Image: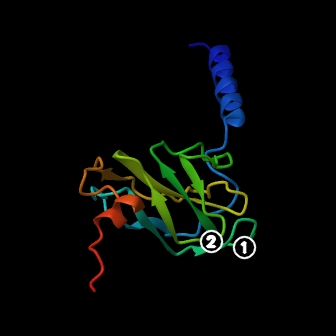
Amino acid sequence: MGRHSLRLLAALCTAGFMTAPALAGDTPAPPDAQVYIIWPKDGRVIPGGKFWLRMGAKQVGIAPAGTKKPNTGHHHVIIDAELPPFDEEIPNNRHYRHFGGGQTEARIELPPGRHTIQLLMGDHDHIPHDPPLYSDRITVIVPPATAETLPVPRAEQSAQAPAPRR
């Protein structure tokens, strides 16, 4: 390769590097910070699909969205989806749930099936830290409802109730 070719290649590489999207937001993550799922554990079977998700964090404070304070953030729960781009605001929909009030536990309801759950910490503007703080992805299983697990309708409850004693 000639000198001109090498210069052109170097210029193209530099230009591409300078215009590449950021890999994470502007808010620095605290050193050694971690986020993790306390409960449920990976592989847990959850009859009925309703449970309390318990979220943990080490070496990073939890603060409501909009609170611009060093070394803090708030949880986002990712259900049945991949991690979003780290240089953009985390989406807010049925797959990406925001807990901008600073919550560390949340009531979750999932339909029957196999589901993945993962945490991603967002800064005051719902953008991941640099480097991003995310948990391991876990899988939970919600079995299909059976006659034993279905709630009994009120009309049937009164029909099945024993007659009062006299």
Q: Amino acid at mark 2?
A: Gly
Q: Note whether residue 108 is visible.
A: yes
- As drawn, the label of residue 148 is none
Q: Is residue 82 left or right of residue 112?
A: right
Q: Note whether residue 40 is visible.
A: no
Q: Amino acid at mark 1?
A: Lys
Give the vertical position of 39 relative to 6 (above or below): below
User: Which quadrant does the N terminus fall into?
Assistant: top right
Residue at the bottom extreme, as displayed: 166
The mark lying in front, picked from 2 and 1, is 2
Q: Is residue 33 left or right of residue 14?
A: left
The image position of residue 132, as x and y in percent, is: 56, 55
Q: Nearer the viewer, residue 84 or 55?
A: 55
- As drawn, the label of residue 102 is 2
Do the residues bearing badges 2 and 1 touch, measured as CB atoms within 8 Å?
Answer: no
- Judging from the image, what secondary structure is the residue with disc 1 in? loop
Residue at the front extreme, as displayed: 166
Q: Nearer the viewer, residue 138 or 155?
A: 155
Q: What residue would you read off at disc 1?
A: 69
Give the vertical position of 161 relative to 25 (above or below): below
